[in-house]
Image: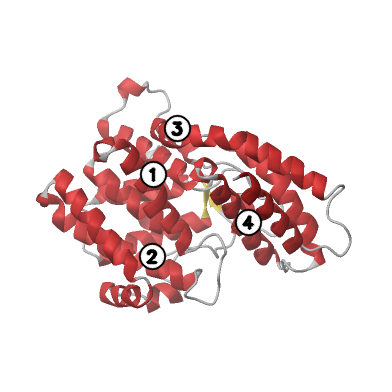
Amino acid sequence: MPVDVACALFDLDRQFPADASELRIRDVAQAANLLRERRQDLFAVMQEVGQAYLGRFGAEHQALLKRVQDALALSFVRMATRHGSWGNDLHEYHNEQHALELLNGRLARVRLQLGWAALEAQDWLLLALFATCHDLRQREAADFWRDIGANERASIAEAFRLLDHVGFSRHVDREFYVCLGLMIAGSTFDARPSAPNPFNTAEVASSGGSLAPKLVAEMTAGRSPEGLDAGLARRARLMLIAADLDTANVGEPFTSLAGSAVRLVQEREQRAGRAIDATESAQPVFDFLTHGQERYFFELHRFVSPLGLEVFGGSKRNNEPKVQWQSRRMRELFPGGPAPGQTGQHVIDAFLRLADEIG
C-alpha cells in the first residue's frame, strides 16, 4: 500500500471527531465500573486468557497486555452504550455481542484449535482489539476514500484516540497503530449498497466481501511473497486474518449462522425504517433470508487467509448443504413469496424453525 494511505490513518481526527458516546465514556475506571455492574463474567475471562497469554509469551509483555485490556474495556463499553444493549440506539447486529463473537468466539477458537504458537505475541493483541474496535462507529454518512468506508475511517480515528488514552504513543508504537488501522480499513465491504438508503450499514454488509484482499493486493503489487519485507508481510497477514474473523459466521454452527442472518436483516429493516412486524417488511426479509443468504454464502464469501481457511473452512463446507436445504424449504413454505398479511416476523420465525430442525 502506498505510504500516503498509512499516513492518512493518523489524519482522521479532524474529519471524525469524538461523538457523544466517546465523550461520555472516557476513563478506563469508568468503563471497568460499568463492566462490573453489567458483565462481571467478562472480567474472569479476561483474567484467565491474560494469564495464559503471559504464560506463553512471558512476563515482559505484562505492561503491553494491561494497556490492551484497558483498551478492550473502553471499546467494549462504548459499543454497548452507543449501538448496543446498554444504549438507546440498538443495532441488532453491529453491537457489543458481535465484538464478543470475534473476541471470545472466533479468536478463541483459533487459539484453542491451533495454539498460541499460531500467531506472534502482539498479533494476538491486535486481533483482540480489532474485535472490539472495527465497528465502533456505524452512523457516518456513506462516503468512501480509496474504497475504505466512512464508518471504518471513523472507527480508526476513535481507536487511535483510544490507544492514546491507555498509554500508547503514535510515535513509539506507530506500527501498532498502523496494523490496527489497516485491519479496520480492510473490514470495509467492497460492494456498494444496492438499496436506496445510503446510510444503511447492514445493507452494505449484506452486499459484498471484505476489502482486505484488494488492499493487500495494492500493498504487495509487483512483489513476490518471498520479496516482502517482514513488516509488510505482517500487515498483509493480519488484514486477511481479521477479514476472515469478521466473516467467519459461515463456519459456525448452523443455528449461529442463521441467527446472525436474522440479526443482520433485523438491523437492515430498522435502518430502512420498516418494522419487522409490518407487512411491508415481509418481502425484503424473505429476499434477504433466501437469495441474499445464498449469494453471500456461495458467491461473495471466501476465506482469504490460510489460518481462516484452516480453522473455519471445514465448518463452512459442512454448512453448504444446510444453506441450500433451508432456502429450498423457505421457498416451499412461501411459494411466490410471503402472502398478503404476512410480515417480516412471520418469515423470520419460519427461518429459525428450519434452522433448529436441521441445525
Labels 2 & 4 near each other (Cβ < 8 A): no
Residue 45, placed above or below residue 89? above
Q: Upstream in the sequence, badge 2 or badge 1?
A: 1
Residue 2 in view here: yes
Looking at the rendered structure, the kind of residue marked 1 is: Asp
Looking at the rendered structure, the kind of residue marked 3 is: Leu
The CA span between labels 2 and 4 is 22 Å
Label for residue 155? Answer: none
Residue found 69% across the figure and 37% down from its top: 324
Looking at the rendered structure, the kind of residue marked 2 is: Phe
Coordinates of residue 260 in the picture (x, y in percent): 57, 53
- The residue that disc 2 covers is 76
Which of the 4 quarters of the picture holds residue 32?
bottom left
Label for residue 309? Answer: 3
Q: Upstream in the sequence, badge 1 or badge 3?
A: 1
Which of the 4 quarters of the picture holds residue 13?
bottom left
Considering depth in this image, is 220 or 4 the residue closer to the camera?
220
The CA span between labels 4 and 1 is 39 Å
Coordinates of residue 265 in the picture (x, y in percent): 65, 57
Residue depth check, mark 2 versus mark 4: number of the one nearer the observer = 4
Instruction: Please tell me whether mark 4 sits on a helix, a strand or a loop.
Output: helix
